[in-house]
Image (cartoon, grey):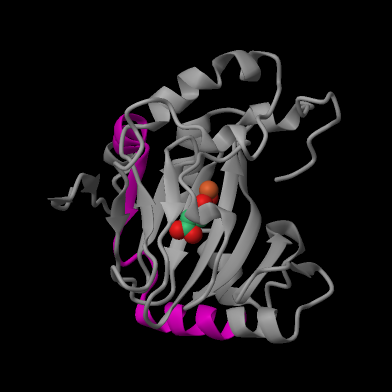
Amino acid sequence: MMQEDQGVQKVDILEIPTLIQSLENDGVVLVPGYLDAATVAEATQECHQLFDRTPSWAHHEEYSVGESVRMERANIDRSAFPAISSTFSRPELELVVSTFFGEGYIFSRTVYAILDVVGSTTRVQQPHYDKMRHLKSFVYLTDVTAASGPFHCVPGSHLATREAERENRLRRIVPTDDDARVLPPGLVGRGIPVPGKAGTLILFDSDIAHYAGIVTEGERLAVRSLSFGAYRSETWYRKDGTVEAAP
Ligand SMILES: O=C(O)CCC(=O)C(=O)O
Ligand SMILES: [Fe+2]
């Protein structure tokens, strides 16, 4: 285990038991140096290719000022995008996901490449938890400081959210975007920034209260993948009774 810093534990990707324990206790853990400099550079090029010449298997999303491309990992052309595809296919990452979720886990199903710049405004800048629970693998491709809109979270808050969603989940109901912005009491204003060098991996349980910081200087490039437990293979519904298809 590496040192603790502002409440977010830093762990090596190979230290599975420590990593899982941090995820269970805190809902978040940091893996500095998950990607080496060469892979960061290669993944950065690949992101710009995704933004500028979006392949047919990827979706260029509406995104304020900045860029967002979503894709299913299974569809990624691995020979043209080796760095991004390998980042989310590494056996050591899969071991984290399989240990975390157990049988029926769904590994790095959906992948996003997102560029935030000065002036980017998105709903995820509001404190929230994610509607469909997942384990997020969030990799910074630029050095992220307080000025470049770091990820923020409230360590430990995933337990309160999980409790708040318990009844919904028993009935396989996902909350609305608005519901997922009503945080259990005591969490408001308690988010801490999670800065990191390019190549840092943040793993978090999406039940944690979290939000994106606002970029005031420079830009923040990041790729992320969503992994799920067996529950994601069931049919989930919105509150109005329609089927929830979103990632
Ligand atoms: O961009 C960020 O820092 C947080 C984004 C977010 O809400 C998420 O990945 O679920
Ligand atoms: Fe989120």
The picture places residue 220, in percent across and down from the top left corner, at 44, 74
For the record, the magenta segment spans 20-46
Q: Is residue 207 left or right of residue 142?
A: right
Task: Give the camera-side residue of 172 and 23.
Answer: 172
Residue 122 falls in image quadrant: bottom right
Q: Is residue 1 left or right of residue 196?
A: left
Q: Is residue 94 magenta?
A: no
How many marks do you count on the picture?
A: 0
The picture places residue 134, in percent across and down from the top left corner, at 56, 39
- From the image, give the main secondary structure of the stretch colored magenta: helix
Q: Is residue 100 above or below residue 31?
A: above
Q: Is residue 141 above or below residue 9?
A: below
The picture places residue 230, in percent across and down from the top left corner, at 65, 29
Q: Is residue 38 above or below residue 7?
A: below
Residue furthest left in the image = 3
Q: Is residue 73 left or right of residue 205?
A: right
Q: Give the residue at x 29% y 37%.
A: 22
Task: Give the camera-side residue of 39 and 133.
Answer: 133
Task: Give the camera-side residue of 180 and 8.
Answer: 180
Q: Is residue 61 left or right of residue 205?
A: right
Quadrant assignment for the C terminus: top right
Q: Is residue 25 magenta?
A: yes
